[in-house]
């Protein structure tokens, strides 16, 4: 199997998002796996810039939706407008019609509008007024979520969270990196010069190849042991579902492809566990403000308990 190197994409994103190599690697992995990414963090740490840079680097169309508490599903999907001259309704596409859609502060909008993304994310099309319309391909939603102790936030329901293949947190930059950012600030994300290092056809081919990466039975067994460990954990009320197990396999395969390998190794699995599982688990514990972060720490602590093949 011939591999398209993703190094130019990684190198370009590193020059734009400084000091966040792990977040960049996870974003590229999620793109190759054909999934959607949830970034849970405070405002102002580069989430929007990352989404914009990914879109422009693959020669894709970028769209940003700023979610608010009065937003309607039609603000996401689009709306039909009556034209007097023709006597017909003309559909105006909403911002969901793009290759990379940034759903900014998704948990600031009510559940009804949050749920309008479900079909888009799962089926890659929308159904409106009895008609079905395909979304652009490739299609990726990168959603940002503020911590739930921020004012005016609505917790994402479990079925919405499960539509995100991976969840990450970027965090503050190191002081040396922040110094460099202050010396060379960009006024706005769309002022950044981003070259297209891939195109849509290449991304789709990478996604196809990712699904064909070989996974040996012992590595599949390693994945299953991780899944069942979350279900048996005394402090987890609900463990990972079968859909979550499938997600772990997809991400591990994509991680192998990003590394230009034709097979999955145990490290691909262990490095994927936290971003794939943390947002899918319901903890039986109410003493933490950031529950997902607490679950992530518990999963990291389990690394030595589950032996690799």
Image: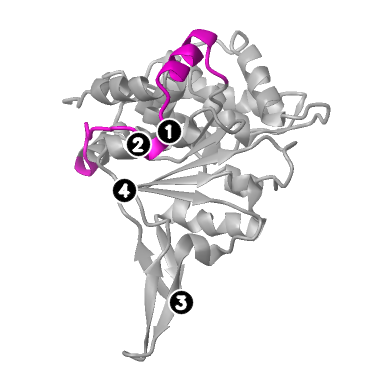
Nearest the camera: 281 or 230?
A: 281
Total count of labels = 4
Q: Locate residue 3, reporting x and y percent.
A: 20, 25
Q: What secondary structure is found at the residue carrying circle 4?
A: loop
**Above or below 66: residue 92:** below
Look at mark 4 in the image and give the residue it sits on. Answer: 61
- CA gap between label 2 and label 1 equals 7 Å
Task: Please provide percent x and percent y for residue 268.
Answer: 42, 18
Compare marks 4 and 3 and give the one earlier in the sequence.
4
Nearer the observer, disc 3 or disc 2? 2
Residue 47 or residue 206, whichever sits in front: 47
Q: Are marks 2 and 1 in contact (CB under 8 Å)?
A: yes
Q: Which residue is mark 2?
A: 191
Residue 186 image offset from top left, x and y in percent: 40, 29
Is 138 covered by the magenta stretch?
no
Q: Is residue 296 left or right of residue 210?
A: right
The residue to which callout 3 is attached is 129
Determine the image quadrant of residue 279.
top right
User: In terms of image quadrants, where is residue 277?
Assistant: top right
For this orientation, the residue located farthest to the right is 287
- Please report whichever mark, 4 or 2, sits nearer to the chain's N-terminal start: 4
Query: Which residues, given as a range, are shown in magenta?
Result: 172-201
Residue at the spot of label 1: 187
């Amino acid at each position: 199997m011939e591999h398209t190197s993703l190094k130019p994409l990684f190198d370009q994103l590193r020059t734009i998002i400084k000091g966040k190599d792990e977040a960049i690697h996870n974003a590229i992995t999620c793109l190759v796996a054909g999934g959607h990414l949830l970034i849970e963090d405070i405002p102002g740490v580069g989430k929007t810039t990352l989404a914009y840079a990914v879109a422009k680097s693959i020669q894709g169309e970028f769209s940003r939706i700023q979610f608010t508490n009065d937003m309607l599903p039609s603000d996401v999907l689009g709306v039909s407008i009556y034209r007097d001259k023709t006597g017909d309704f003309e559909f105006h596409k909403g911002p969901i019609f793009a290759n990379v859609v940034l759903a900014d502060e998704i948990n600031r909008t009510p559940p009804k509008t949050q749920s309008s993304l479900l079909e888009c994310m799962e089926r890659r099309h929308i159904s409106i007024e009895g008609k079905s319309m395909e979304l652009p391909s490739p299609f990726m939603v990168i959603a940002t979520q503020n911590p739930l102790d921020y004012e005016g936030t609505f917790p994402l329901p479990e079925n919405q969270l499960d539509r995100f293949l991976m969840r990450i947190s970027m965090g503050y930059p190191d002081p040396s990196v922040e110094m460099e950012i202050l010396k060379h600030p960009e006024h706005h994300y769309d002022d950044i010069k981003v070259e297209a290092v891939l195109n849509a056809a290449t991304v789709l081919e990478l996604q196809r190849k990712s699904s064909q990466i070989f996974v040996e039975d012992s590595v599949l067994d390693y994945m299953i042991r991780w899944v069942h460990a979350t279900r048996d954990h005394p402090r987890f009320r609900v463990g990972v579902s079968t859909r979550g197990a499938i997600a772990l396999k997809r991400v591990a395969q994509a991680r192998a492809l990003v590394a230009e390998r034709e097979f999955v190794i145990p490290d691909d699995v262990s490095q994927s566990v936290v971003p794939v599982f943390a947002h899918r688990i319901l903890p039986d514990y109410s003493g933490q403000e950031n529950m997902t972060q607490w679950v992530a720490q518990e999963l990291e602590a389990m690394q030595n308990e589950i032996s690799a093949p």
